[in-house]
Amino acid sequence: GQQVMQIPQYQHVQEGEDFTTYCNSSTTLSNIQWYKQRPGGHPVFLIQLVKSGEVKKQKRLTFQFGEAKKNSSLHITATQTTDVGTYFCAAATSGTYKYIFGTGTRLKVLA
Amino acid sequence: GAVVSQHPSWVICKSGTSVKIECRSLDFQATTMFWYRQFPKQSLMLMATSNEGSKATYEQGVEKDKFLINHASLTLSTLTVTSAHPEDSSFYICSAGLEATSVYNEQFFGPGTRLTVL
């Protein structure tokens, strides 16, 4: 079945450093979503990418969808302690409404 | 934004009992809802897709007789864990989308239900 892997699994950064998580699918995707889950909380939608090569920005967050629509990345510039949490990508393939979540990247930001 | 609630937020039960978890979309109608389970420090695993007025679609490896899903209205889906055992202890989360017929469907997640089976 479809697999969605994220790397790294964990990342500890000093506040102010940049952070990137990568999401890779074994199959071509129709679109991809990114979520953030704070410790003890539930996933919160961040963004959706649909087009090949698409890049979207939200303040310090930059999201990118690969040209082949099989991978995606989330980059955070100048991390803050409020960025702490686990970032998940969620991938959908054509013809289905369901999303398969990636393995997640847990981010810790040290003040 | 769209709000999804879950009840209860946590439940502790004895082995062999059944537990029902409710998922409600509070300010929108959700033709399709999704049920996930999440073990500590792991990802969300899709269990089933719940469709209003029809049978749920279960993912491979998920026992449909064990995890009963009912989606009787456009705002309510229920997951019943039957004859629960300690290995069923987990965090169960539901989600709903605004446009069931579109794959470009932002999911709104409920706060989750933590089930502990003794």
Image (spheres, helix red, strand yellow):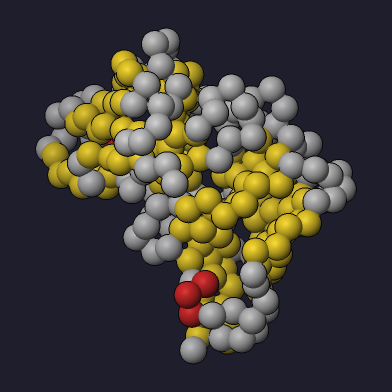
Vertical side of B9 occupied by A96: above or below: above
B113 is higher (above) or lower (below) than A106: above
**Residue occupying image coordinates x 49% and y 89%:** A111
In the rendered image, is residue B116 in sight? no
Can residue B29 be seen here? yes
**Quadrant in which the N terminus of chain A appears:** top right
A47 or A99, which lies in front? A47
Q: Position of residue B76 (x, y in %)?
A: 31, 26
Residue at image location 40% in from the left, 32% down from the top: B28
Residue at 64% in and 69% down: A59
Q: Position of residue B45 (x, y in %)?
A: 48, 40
Q: Nearer the viewer, residue B37 or B55?
A: B55
- Residue A2, compared with residue B49, is above or below; it is below
Picture residue at 46% right of the left edge, 52% below the top: A43
Which one is in front, B27 or B55? Answer: B27
For the view shown, which residue lies furthest in the left direction? B14
Q: Position of residue A5 (x, y in %)?
A: 66, 50
Q: Quadrant of residue A22?
A: bottom right
Disc tally is 0
State the residue lying farthest toward the right: A67
Q: Nearer the viewer, residue B31 or B6?
A: B31
* B13 relative position to B61: left or right: left
Tell which residue pokes out farthest to the top in this image. B54
Quarter location, residue B30: top left
Q: Is residue A11 left or right of residue A25?
A: left
> In the picture provided, is A94 more to the left or to the right than B93?
right
Residue A16 in percent (x, y) is at: 61, 86
- Residue B117: quarter of image: top left
